[in-house]
Image: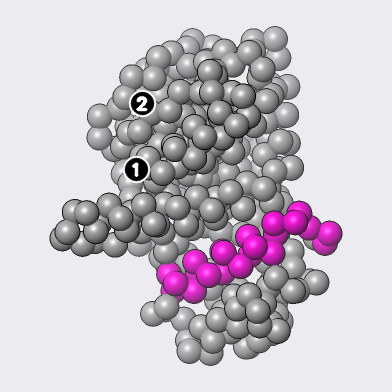
Amino acid sequence: MANHSHHAHASHSGHAPADHTHGTPPGAGHAGHDDTENTENTRDTDDAALAEHLDLSAEVLRAHRDEVVGWLDELVGDRRPHRILDVGSGTGSGTFTLLRQFTGAHVTAVDSSPTMLHILRERARAHGMADRVHTVQADLDETWPSVGTPDLVWASASLHHLGDPDRALAELSSVLRPGGLLVVTEADSFLPRFLPDDAGPGAPGLEARCHAALAEFQAQHVPEMGSDWGARLAGAGFAIRAERPFVIDLAPPLPEAAGRFALATLGRIRSALDEQLSVEDLTALDALTDENGPDSVLNRPDLTVRTARTVWVATLP
């Protein structure tokens, strides 16, 4: 599965969006070293940093996630899920939201990152839910693990990381209980926006230029993002039960973690687009991500959080 690092594996997030509210932030790829130990150390460092970013996203977008799961609860009705599969669980924001909503359920959380799964297990213990969570480390572009027969599959911002999403959907159709639900969430873009057009420092339109460059990055490295997921679900034999867009536009007062989320996100953009942006734009990003500087996003009263996601709920006819 993706480990939120632009590998074709699938983690997330949850990542998400994020989710993996999250689509996977850029700049999270693991450096390629010949030395295996150094490679693993780099991956661990990357995953730890990404886990922090995913957690900030989850905290800021908690109300959105609760809204999605509340809507899902209405669709489920009396057929409460008992066995849930979280595809690309990341650190577990979706896992724990589902466990709180469906109190009789158990979740199998699958991710390619051992760091993410370790964090998830520790949180399950802290929340008194360890007996309701089973983690599986697996790369879903390789051999699929045994996941039982889930009543509900949750894939939040994870399918676009896979090298062959259609194969993944076929695998999911083979394990989903008859009458069960597959929930797919995908974001419209990699990352949320936070700044007004004339944010200062630098020239107006900084964030728009960053996202234009990110779109080029996406087309090259994550071509499945932005797919027609409704058509792909239908092609895998699923019937779309519901499709709903969610527009997220948070204005002050924002959740407490919003400033740190913006700081981390813009920092990842700065790292990923070092060779794509102008010197002026890079300098502006440096100023915005300087925690102690006068232009830091941590001190901005005009910060917002803007993103959009679509959720598909599908079943097997």
Q: Is residue 35 visible to the viewer in this orientation of the structure?
A: yes
Is 152 placed above or below 46 here? above
Q: Which residues are magenta?
A: 252-273
Mark 2 falls on what kind of element? helix
What residue lies at 61% left-to-right and 43% top-to-bottom?
310
Q: Determine the image quadrant of residue 211.
A: bottom right
Magenta stretch prevailing secondary structure: helix
Nearer-the-camera pick, 147 or 115: 115
N-terminal-most mark, 1 or 2: 1
Which residue is outermost to the right?
Answer: 253
Is residue 41 rendered to the left or right of residue 286? left
Q: Position of residue 245 (x, y in %)?
A: 66, 43
Q: Secondary structure at mark 1?
A: loop
In the rendered structure, the answer to whether residue 168 lies left or right of residue 207 reads left
Q: Is residue 230 above or below residue 249?
A: above
Residue drawn at the location 49% of the way across and 40% of the way down: 119
Q: Residues within 10 Å of mark 2 (few under 14, many from 20)?
A: some
Q: Position of residue 234 (x, y in %)?
A: 46, 29
Q: Is residue 258 magenta?
A: yes
Whether 65 is drawn above or below 241: the answer is below
Residue matched to label 1: 9
Residue at point 41%, 52% (across, down): 47
Query: Magenta stretch containing residue 196, yes or no?
Result: no
Residue 237 seen? no
- Residue 170 marker: 2
Residue type highlighted by circle 1: His
Q: Amino acid at mark 2?
A: Ala
Which residue occupies 58% across, 49% down? Answer: 55
